[in-house]
Image (cartoon, rainbow, N blue to C red):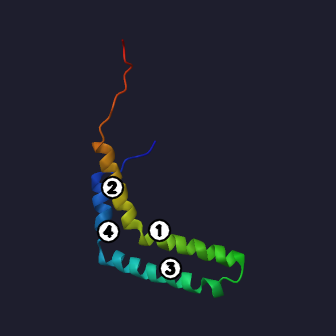
């Protein structure tokens, strides 16, 4: 069973995402992810190092895109609330 995030919880998350510290962390994470992408071919000399580097890039990308994810989740939850629930009853003739 999926637990619905409350409006207050979304407001708290968005408040955090609007902070200067979060913005700085996102900027630095984006720079680091790009640097890893740019230097992976010469740095990742083995498959293990390459896979580890890919994991680092994925984690950084998740952090950089977290605000987009949260806003999409909020919209989806709101759409689900506003969706008209249709009851399908058998047609009796």
**Residue with the most extreme front position:** 93
Position of residue 47 relative to residue 15, above or below, is below
**Residue lying furthest top in this view?**
93
Q: Residue at x 48, y 72 (%)?
A: 61
Residue 47: percent from the left, percent from the top?
71, 76
Quarter of the image containing the C terminus? top left
Q: Which mark is residue 74?
A: 2
**Which label sits on residue 92?**
none
Q: CA distance from mark 3 to mark 2?
A: 26 Å
Left or right of 75 in this view: 55: right
Seen at 55% across and 81% down, the residue is 37
Q: Nearer the viewer, mark 4 or mark 3?
A: 3
Sequence-wise, which precedes: disc 1 or disc 3?
Answer: 3
**Image point 33% across, 32% down: which residue?**
86
The residue identified by callout 1 is: 62
Name the quadrant containing residue 29: bottom left
Crowding at dot 1, Cα within 10 Å, few <14 / some 14-19 / many 20+, comes out as: some
Name which of mark 3 and mark 2 comes first in the sequence: 3
Dot label at residue 16: 4
- Residue 78, how many percent across, how many down? 30, 49
């Amino acid at each position: 069973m999926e637990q619905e995030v409350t409006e207050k919880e979304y407001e708290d998350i968005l408040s955090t995402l609007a902070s200067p510290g979060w913005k700085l962390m996102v900027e630095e994470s984006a720079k680091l992810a790009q640097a890893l992408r740019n230097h992976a071919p010469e740095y990742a000399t083995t498959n293990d190092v390459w896979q580890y580097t890919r994991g680092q890039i994925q984690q950084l990308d998740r952090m950089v895109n977290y605000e987009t994810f949260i806003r999409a989740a909020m919209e989806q939850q709101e759409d689900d609330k506003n969706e008209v629930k249709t009851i399908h009853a058998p047609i009796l003739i």
